Amino acid sequence: MNPEVTLKRVELKDLPSIARVHLVSFPDSALTKLGPTIVELYYRWQLTGPHQKVKATGAFVADECAGFSFSGIFNGSTTGFIHTYKTPLIKAVLSRPLLVFNPLFLKRFSEGVRLLARFAKKGSGPKTDGLRSAPNYGILSIAVSPQFQKLGIGQLLMLDAENEAFEYGCREICLTVHPGNTKAVRFYENQNWQKFAPSSLWNGAMIKTLR
């Protein structure tokens, strides 16, 4: 018999649990390499930053966080995070010198530095005005702890995000997945997501029409 799963809105007090699920779900991500404190700060920004729309849902089995999803219309989900927490980010990198030999981390970190440089050049913080009249609702992150997989939790979290987007007035939802993550790609395709490739090269973008 499968355990009972409860979905609830993520609050600030839940962020340490969210970070733990992220760490075990994405062990090779650049964010994970910077440690649990940075992961927690990342989701703090996604939860509290000046975004147009945020839906943060945690899936709990008893009192343990088994998974989560962050969806909505995010303004500067990366640039805002880097700008707001640049000091702890720099400290985290300096305290982990071996990261300079990690090709994936170097790639992601260099992308972050370019974003921050562009951000600083503009001389302004994350913008909340000038929003599109037809917003692009997306799933920023979705994860299920390995020990709770194959219980339908990922599907519950996905449906929760899709319902929120539909009720918000959006008829399309998007996400990005690493093209090499065939397991995740198959999961999304089984949920009627489609690869979105404006050119012949697919970069991991996927969309779903909501009905």
Image (spheres, rainbow, N blue to C red):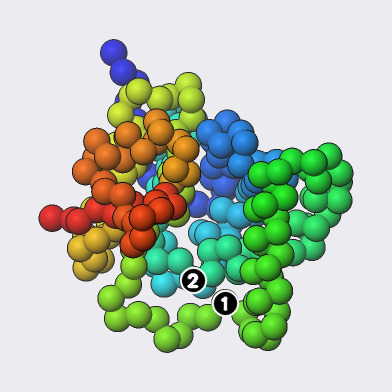
Q: Residue at x 57, y 77 (%)?
A: 126
Q: Is residue 176 left or right of residue 208?
A: right
- Residue identifier under label 1: 126
> Dot 2 corresponds to which residue?
75
The quarter in which the C terminus is drawn is bottom left
The reply to whether dot 1 and dot 2 touch (C-beta < 8 Å) is yes
Residue 165 x %, y %: 27, 60
Q: Is residue 192 above or below residue 174?
A: above
- Asked whether residue 9 is in view, the answer is no
Which tag, 1 or 2, sits closer to the chain's start?
Answer: 2
Q: Residue at x 61, y 34 (%)?
A: 27
Confirm whether residue 152 shows in the render.
yes
Residue at 24% of width from left, 36% of height from top?
190
**Amino acid type, mark 1:** Pro
Q: Count residues near mark 1 (Cα–Cα under 10 Å), then give few for <14, some for 14-19, many for 20+.
A: some
Q: Where's residue 56, x and y in %?
A: 42, 52
Residue 63: percent from left, percent from top: 47, 31
Mark pair 1, 2: CA separation: 7 Å
Amino acid type for the residue under numbered disc 2: Asn
